[in-house]
Image (cartoon, rainbow, N blue to C red):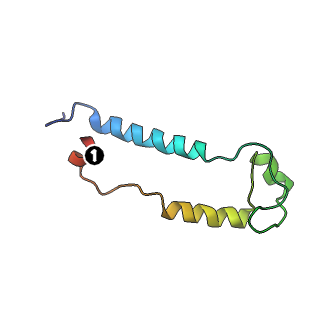
Amino acid sequence: MATGWAQDGAVQEQIEDSIQDAVDRARSQLPAGPSLTHCEECGDPIPQARREALPGVRLCVPCQTEHDADQRQSAGYNRRGSKDSQLR
């Protein structure tokens, strides 16, 4: 039972929308096109198995790991906002 300005199910809708936004953002960042044979950051060779598993791959595993860590730090999700501020 929702109260105030929020309608019934508004919290669940917001959760689903947040998840869908995150999925869409992740899909938009996936590489596309032909894979590189060598890492564009360090120049090390990219193994054939990695190139086949991830079409469009441009980084070796160590460089991709570092890139992912940098992305995680700058994600910018608001996990502390109150319910009221999120539903308006």
Q: Is residue 55 above or below residue 67?
A: above
In the figure, is residue 46 to the left or right of 18? right
Report which residue position mark 1 lands on: 86
Bin the neighbour count of mark 1 within 10 Å (Cα to Cα): few under 14, some 14-19, many 20 and up. Answer: few
Residue located 28% across and 54% down the image: 81
Residue sitting farthest toward the top: 8
Q: Position of residue 19 (x, y in %)?
A: 45, 42
Q: Quadrant of the C terminus?
A: top left
> Looking at the rendering, which quadrant does residue 12 occupy?
top left
Q: Position of residue 57 (x, y in %)?
A: 74, 52
Residue sitting farthest toward the left: 4
Q: Position of residue 13 (x, y in %)?
A: 34, 35
> Looking at the rendering, which quadrant does residue 46 occupy?
bottom right
Q: Quadrant of the N terminus?
A: top left
Number of marks in picture: 1
Q: Is residue 87 above or below residue 1?
A: below
Q: Amino acid at mark 1?
A: Gln
In the figure, is residue 42 to the left or right of 76? right
Residue located 24% across and 52% down the image: 82
Residue sitting farthest toward the front: 40
Residue located 42% across and 57% down the image: 76
Q: Is residue 28 above or below residue 62?
A: above
Q: Position of residue 36 (x, y in %)?
A: 81, 53
Q: Give the SS element for disc 1.
A: helix
Residue located 59% across and 42% down the image: 27
In the figure, is residue 8 to the left or right of 34? left
